[in-house]
Amino acid sequence: MCLGTIAQVVEVHRDGRAIVEHGGRREEVLAMTVADDDIQPGEWVVIHSGFALERITEAQAKDALAIRATDPDTTNHKETAS
């Protein structure tokens, strides 16, 4: 299973590329895959394999980042008796 990465757009270039930042590092992606209209610096996107796949709201980005930062061992799991 592949998961996209949540990133914030830092720069947008006229040739369909953009620079995004995630996890403290910057990466160049193809921004032309976001169908609506051009993405802008400051917006949030889901990226995967070098492509910006979808624009998301800041609230969606923060929620997704918070979920990913959660330690899976701290969630409530029911243990079954053997």
Image (cartoon, rainbow, N blue to C red):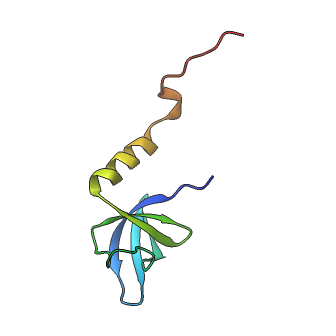
Residue 13, position as x, y percentages in the image: 36, 86
Residue at horizontal 40 percent and vertical 78 percent from the top: 18
Q: Is residue 48 above or below residue 32?
A: above
Q: Is residue 50 above or below residue 72?
A: below
Residue 37, position as x, y percentages in the image: 32, 78
Residue at horizontal 40 percent and vertical 70 percent from the top: 20
Residue 61, position as x, y percentages in the image: 35, 54
Residue 38, position as x, y percentages in the image: 32, 79
Kindly give the residue lying farthest to the right in the view shown: 82
Residue at horizontal 28 percent and vertical 75 percent from the top: 40
Kindly give the residue lying farthest to the bottom in the view shown: 15
In terms of image quadrants, where is residue 54? bottom left
Q: Is residue 81 above or below residue 61?
A: above
Side of 17 where 40 appears, left or right: left
Residue at horizontal 44 percent and vertical 37 percent from the top: 70
In terms of image quadrants, where is residue 42? bottom left
